């Protein structure tokens, strides 16, 4: 009887020990699973943050490229119109004047190159610098045929910290010239125009030469 009881005790103890061992193993498995889930969650969070940062960087890069392309296209358009400038004159109050206005925030002249391309003949184009919210500058261009009142308008450049026009003055008797803010000379036109542009602390200014800036024969509009 004692031997049988001993065997039963050994079997019971073995069963209890095995059950406890299984429980312990099960507990460690759940703990490891929870730790694994936590690590995976952290890794996913980091991955999501990195992807968001990457998407934002790509989006910012695309916006920057788009902005630079817009500036380049707008400047090319302005340059094409300046290169095609025609020195038209008109008589006002008995005085013959060029159809040209040069101020820091306004550039107006006559050209045979239309912004819209479909226009034929001479057009008068005006570039206006307008200050908007938070002091940001915008460049608007308007155009109408000579002798016509109907105007078309388009926004070329936007959200610049600084924007203005400057004009290179050089008298025919002078060897050196100088940049001035406003053009008041009535007998000839500037040789060069500088478009002063500052955006995000970057200087994007450029100089645009005028082919007719030396007092070439003008065409009079009656």
Image: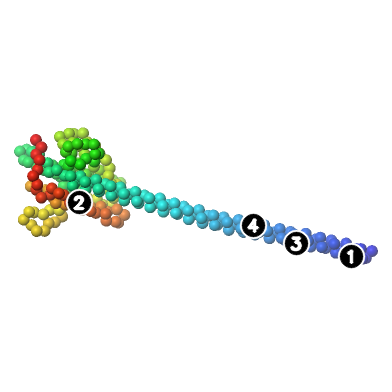
Closer to the eye: label 2 or 3: 2
Q: Which mark is residue 21?
A: 3
Q: Secondary structure at mark 1?
A: helix
Give the labeled residue for mark 2.
208
Question: In terms of sequence position, does the residue under pointer 3 or pointer 4 come before the other?
Answer: 3
**Is any atom of residue 171 visible in this view?**
yes
- Label 1: how many residues lie within 10 Å, few (<14), some (14-19) or many (20+)? few
**Quadrant in the picture for the N terminus:** bottom right
Closer to the eye: label 1 or 2: 2
Give the labeled residue for mark 1.
6
Give the labeled residue for mark 4.
33
Q: Marks 3 and 1: CB-CB under 8 Å?
A: no
Q: Secondary structure at mark 2?
A: strand
Between 134 and 203, the one nearer to me in the picture: 203
Give the image location of residue 113, x and y in percent: 20, 41
**Quadrant in the picture for the C terminus:** top left
Between the residue at mark 4 and the residue at mark 2, the CA separation in whole angstroms equals 69 Å
At horizontal 10% and vertical 40% (from top left) the residue drawn is 219
Above or below for 65 versus 7: above
Between the residue at mark 1 and the residue at mark 4, the CA separation in whole angstroms equals 40 Å
Question: In terms of sequence position, does the residue under pointer 1 or pointer 4 come before the other?
Answer: 1
Q: Marks 3 and 4: CB-CB under 8 Å?
A: no
Question: In terms of sequence position, does the residue under pointer 4 or pointer 2 come before the other?
Answer: 4
Between 39 and 114, the one nearer to me in the picture: 114
């Amino acid at each position: 009887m004692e031997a049988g009881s001993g065997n039963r005790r050994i079997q019971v103890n073995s069963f209890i020990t095995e059950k406890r061992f299984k429980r312990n193993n099960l507990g460690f498995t759940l703990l490891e699973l929870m730790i694994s889930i936590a690590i995976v969650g952290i890794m996913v969070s980091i991955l999501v943050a990195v992807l968001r940062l990457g998407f934002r960087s790509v989006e910012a890069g695309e916006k920057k490229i788009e902005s630079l392309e817009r500036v380049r296209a707008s400047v090319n358009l302005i340059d094409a119109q300046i290169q095609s400038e025609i020195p038209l004159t008109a008589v006002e109050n008995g005085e013959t004047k060029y159809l040209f206005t040069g101020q820091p925030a306004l550039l107006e002249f006559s050209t045979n190159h239309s912004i819209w391309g479909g226009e034929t003949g001479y057009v008068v184009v005006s570039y206006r610098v307008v200050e908007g919210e938070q002091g940001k500058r915008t460049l608007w261009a308007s155009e109408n045929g000579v002798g016509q009142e109907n105007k078309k308008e388009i926004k070329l450049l936007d959200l610049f910290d600084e924007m203005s026009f400057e004009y290179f003055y050089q008298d025919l008797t002078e060897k050196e010239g100088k940049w001035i803010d406003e053009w008041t000379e009535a007998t000839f036109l500037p040789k060069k125009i500088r478009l002063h542009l500052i955006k995000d602390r970057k200087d994007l200014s450029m100089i645009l030469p005028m082919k007719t800036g030396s007092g070439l024969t003008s065409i009079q509009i009656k």
